[in-house]
Image: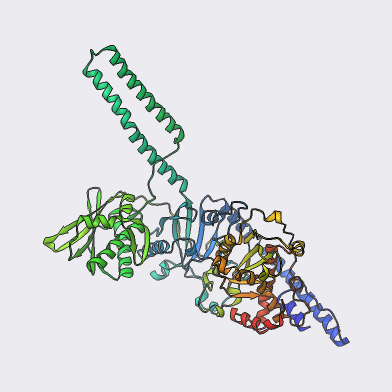
Amino acid sequence: MAEGIRIILNAHPSHRIEPAGPPEVRLLARAVNELAEHGETLTRDLETRVVQAKSSVEQEKNRLAALMSELSQGVLVCNRDGRVLLYNERARQVLGAAAHPRNGNAAALVGLGRSIFAIMDRSLLAHALESVRARLEKQEAEPNTQFVITTRAGQLVRVRMAPVLAAASPPARGTAPNPSRRPSPDESGEAGRIVQATPDAPASARTAMSGFVMTLEDITRAFELDSTRDMLLQSLTEGSRAALANIRAAVETLARYPDCEPVHRDRFIQIIGDEVRKLSHTLDQTTAEHADSLKTRWPLEEILGVDIIAAARRRIESRLGLSTQTEALDDSLWLRADSYTLVQALAYLAGRLREEYGVGELRFGLARHARIAELDLIWSGPVLSQQILHDWELDPMSVGGEDGPLTLSDVAERHAAELVFIAEPERRRALFRLLLPVANPVSPPFVAPIRYGENRPEFYDFDLFRQAGQTPELDQVPLADLTYTVFDTETTGLDPTAGDEIIAIGAVRIVNNRLLWYETFEQLIDPGRPIAAMSQTIHGISHDMLRGQPTIDRVLPRFHEYCDDTVLVAHNAAFDMRFLQLKEARTGIRFTQPVLDTLLLSQVLHPSQESHALEAIAERLGVAVVARHTALGDALLTAEVFLRMIPLLGVHGIRTLGDARQAAERIYDRVKY
């Protein structure tokens, strides 16, 4: 009876206790059921009122969701640790893994709670965030930046980043809390309040970042057109030289010898006609094939030269340990630059000077000469030669142990710049001078920093700003705050040591105590062996369904990436994990995450119950059983069951991951697989 009361109280309000035993106990059971019925009625009435009160908010949410889905640009919002809080489908398409050619399924790299640093280059993002913070500290009106990344599929994506500012006043009245989230103990005080910066707040409050928003634009096609147009112009230029030379020679000969014999005159006229027709044909053909090609360059942003120098100084001092100073700087000079590669180039030069010539201090200068900006990297001591600089220009740049594919020559070409070495023996110093075109600043499209309390959208989870994340103290993290991958497998048989193989994997993610129905993993697998007849009657997967599907060697790396930085959950997890472990030597893939088993946890919660099968647990906890014996269907059912278990585990004093693992281990020997 006690177990039944706990189920009613914490997991399944519609559960009722079957009266049994002496008359007094049966009478008590009926009274408990009446009390449960009364409580459920009150709860339904309260839920009805809440739904009515939220109807307008729900309409606004749906409008915003529709707007997000229609945007041609991808949108990502991350907290300050780089965890994804919001994204739209376009962002997932741009940044997602390449789909399988047969079924189009792909492991969703973009997902709530996932780290953006696993998707984009960490050093590039760190540089962009550093630029945004520097602009915030200068209290610029538009502290935004942009850069270009290359995706795994080889696409070029322009990224625009703007800060999400920390707040400094209580949230706007009427903002609904997330009902699925349990507040942390410190949220009753200042540490847990989301506040909005006010004009009279301290500068640190007005410039503190709690996250950032990025818009993503696929520019691959435009860049391909640029490259095609460049090659086209080059081919037209080079291909026309011979024809024009022939025409010119024929015309000059006719002009020089007007009285030449008719046979020779006709021959020269024929040459002119043939060459003109060839040129005309070539122009017509290229015009038809490349009419929509436009010539552009690698996307650059307008930035103050002093900001480039400030970023370079920070990198050189932090990565290389060199002292840096400045000389005369023209703080009004704007450049059109890819700030990341330009800073990387300056840091690379500094590193070579330190390693090969023992230079310990560098100075920066910036001046304008007509339409050219002169950015100087100055040092005292050893003098180089132009040949040494030429050799350095051809080596791939490496800074602080980080290698990059670009060379100094690539960076100079990208910026239409020139790098020269200048020796000043009378001043006992030398310098590298980077000659860059001066830019006329044009204000970028305004992207207002997002502040909380202003039309806050609710179809995503801002509570992830306080997400626990992956830490060495993972066992101390509350169960409701962890990120989970709940998975299931279907197999050719029940004995992995006898050669049975996985034929399907299904999985779903739980983030911040929410089941993410739209972030699933589902993949059939060609096992390369027959399926046992008994197994086929259970899961219904035939040989024909598996023909042409990828093998386990190709699927496991994608599934491992899908599970990254999460706790694994399965029902009868030892069975599924054994199949995965036997593939470690063959695939090199190891699943080392913590694992929770709903079969063991059910015995912890309800030791007196006869059955701990997944269907029986679902019935006890009020979870509808649908789509059983498919990998994804069982994973979804297990996930719903696990979410119902979390509050029940709390009643038993099992609140953290470590508590759950220890409780399961204590009864492990009682479970027979």
Quarter of the image that includes the C terminus: bottom right
Residue 180 in the image: x percent, y percent? 63, 70
Coloring scheme used: rainbow
Residue 567 in the image: x percent, y percent? 59, 72
Q: Nearer the viewer, residue 383 or 145?
A: 383
Instruction: Left or right? Give the position of 498 relative to 142.
Output: right
Residue drawn where x is 56% and y is 73% of the image = 592
Instruction: Left or right? Give the position of 272 relative to 497.
Output: left
Q: Nearer the viewer, residue 428 or 91?
A: 428
Q: How many marks?
A: 0
Q: Is residue 534 above or below residue 608?
A: above
Residue drawn where x is 87% and y is 87% of the image = 22
Q: Is residue 139 visible?
A: no
Q: Nearer the viewer, residue 435 or 397?
A: 397
Q: Is residue 304 visible?
A: yes
Residue drawn where x is 76% and y is 74% of the image = 620
**Splitting the image into 4 quarters, where does residue 376 fall?**
bottom left
Q: Nearer the viewer, residue 263 or 191?
A: 263
**Splitting the image into 4 quarters, where does residue 630 fall?**
bottom right
Instruction: Left or right? Give the position of 397 relative to 528.
Output: left
Quarter of the image that includes the N terminus: bottom right
Residue 601 in the image: x percent, y percent? 68, 78
Residue 389 in the image: x percent, y percent? 24, 57
Instruction: Left or right? Give the position of 91 relative to 295.
Output: right
Q: Residue furthest right?
A: 23
